[in-house]
Image (tube, rainbow, N blue to C red):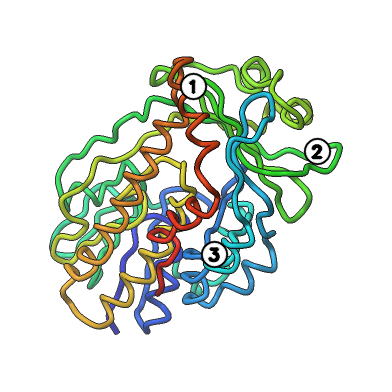
């Protein structure tokens, strides 16, 4: 029985283990953390990702623990709509995206793994082209080595050398809150060099996220800074921040990878953030990792030549990463004249055009 050795036990790594198991492979997952857990963040799963989850046999279970995203769009800081999503057209053409807590998705993936597949507390120090991986418990080998170890991937060094992530120019905060009153229309609000978004979760809580232009590594005082920046914006943003717990706020600078020249080298393949870490502006980071998992397992089961995976996945993921970066650049505009023009243009774009523009992203099939 061929073996897939997977470095990284996040969403992409666990999904890849499930995908290879369904193809009849032995799988082993090396995860450096002592336990699999994810806290404090919601996750949008777009229709393309839901199709990938269906291919993994998990679609119905995920839908049962998620909630369909409702009406959405972009507003200015006073609450005036700049853009509204055509949800009916979206649903009819692509299917509706759903929102789920990352911890719930990770738990379902973990539960679906074959017994004794996951080895936690395993820090990988070297990946060799012959399929040998050195880690804190010794060495492991595989017929295919999958680097699912994130933006600072060790496996990536064996594929394309040292590639440094680049700072996007903005930082992000994430927090899940229990609102004191129901929250209506969802979506994002764009200010000058700042954005705030919120979306409902199935248990009634609300996932909030915010961005701001800051130097890389700039310190933040968490919830206090969020309230200073966004506390005077339109409802329900002030009340959501009032309901937030400072200890639950996550703060991370946003980094992305430059476009790699390849995702494979011999028996090694990269997936997810190890291959194409992107800004979160299209909500496609985890979605693309799920697609990667399905495609890589299919290619590996049919052919020893992993370059077919590279040919299928690299153009698509790099297109989506570039598009996400452009959206972020527009959303983070800070000068008053540029923001005025941006907002005026957004008001002129018909919602039907926005739905059509998503086709290259959402039309993916397994």
Q: Give the residue number, with chain letter if any, for mark 1.
A: 193
Viewer-nearest of labels 2 and 1? 1
Nearer to us in this view, 102 or 44? 44
Q: Which mark sits nearer the N-terminus, 3 or 2?
A: 3
Instruction: Classify 10 Å Cα crowding around label 3: few (below 14), some (14-19), many (20 and above).
Output: many
Q: Is residue 249 above or below residue 294?
A: above
Viewer-nearest of labels 1 and 3? 1
Q: Give the residue number, with chain letter if any, for mark 2.
A: 179
Q: Give the residue number, with chain letter if any, for mark 3.
A: 110
Q: Secondary structure at mark 3?
A: helix
Nearer to us in this view, 85 or 252? 85
In this rendering, position of residue 261 left or right of residue 140: left
In this rendering, position of residue 322 left or right of residue 109: left
Q: Look at 35% across and 64% down and name the residue there.
A: 292
- Are dots 3 and 2 in contact, CB under 8 Å? no
Q: Secondary structure at mark 1?
A: loop
Q: Which mark sits nearer the N-terminus, 1 or 3?
A: 3
């Amino acid at each position: 029985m061929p073996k897939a050795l997977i470095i990284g036990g996040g969403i992409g790594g666990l999904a890849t283990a499930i995908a290879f198991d369904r193809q009849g492979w032995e799988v082993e997952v090396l995860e450096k953390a002592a336990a699999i857990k994810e806290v404090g963040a919601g996750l949008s799963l777009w229709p393309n990702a839901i199709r990938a989850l269906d291919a993994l046999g998990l679609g119905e279970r995920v839908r049962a623990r998620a909630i369909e995203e409702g009406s959405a769009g972009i507003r200015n800081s006073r609450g005036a709509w700049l853009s509204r999503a055509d949800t009916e057209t979206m649903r009819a053409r692509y299917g509706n995206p759903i929102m789920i807590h990352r911890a719930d998705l990770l738990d379902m993936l973990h539960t679906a793994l074959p017994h004794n597949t996951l080895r936690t507390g395993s820090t990988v120090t070297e990946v060799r082209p012959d399929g040998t991986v050195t880690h804190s418990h010794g060495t492991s080998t595989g017929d295919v080595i999958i680097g699912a170890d994130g933006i600072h991937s060790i496996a990536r060094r064996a594929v394309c050398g040292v590639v440094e992530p680049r700072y996007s120019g903005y930082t992000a905060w994430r927090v899940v809150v229990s609102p004191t009153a129901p929250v209506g229309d969802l979506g994002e609000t764009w200010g000058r060099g700042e954005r705030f978004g919120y979306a409902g979760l199935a248990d009634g809580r609300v996932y909030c996220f915010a961005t701001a232009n800051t130097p890389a590594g700039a310190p933040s005082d968490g919830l206090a800074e969020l309230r200073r920046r966004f506390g005077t914006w339109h409802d329900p943003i002030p009340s959501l921040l009032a309901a937030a717990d400072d200890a639950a706020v996550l703060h991370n600078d946003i980094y992305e990878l430059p476009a790699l020249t390849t995702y494979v080298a011999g028996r090694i393949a990269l997936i997810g953030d190890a291959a194409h870490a992107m800004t979160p502006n299209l909500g496609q980071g985890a979605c693309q990792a799920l697609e990667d998992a399905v495609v890589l397992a299919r290619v590996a089961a049919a052919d020893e030549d992993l370059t077919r995976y590279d040919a299928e996945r690299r153009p698509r993921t790099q297109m989506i990463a570039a598009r996400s970066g452009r959206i972020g650049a527009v959303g983070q505009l800070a000068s008053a004249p540029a923001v005025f023009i941006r907002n005026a243009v957004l008001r002129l774009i018909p919602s039907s055009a926005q739905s059509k523009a998503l086709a290259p992203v959402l039309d993916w099939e397994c």
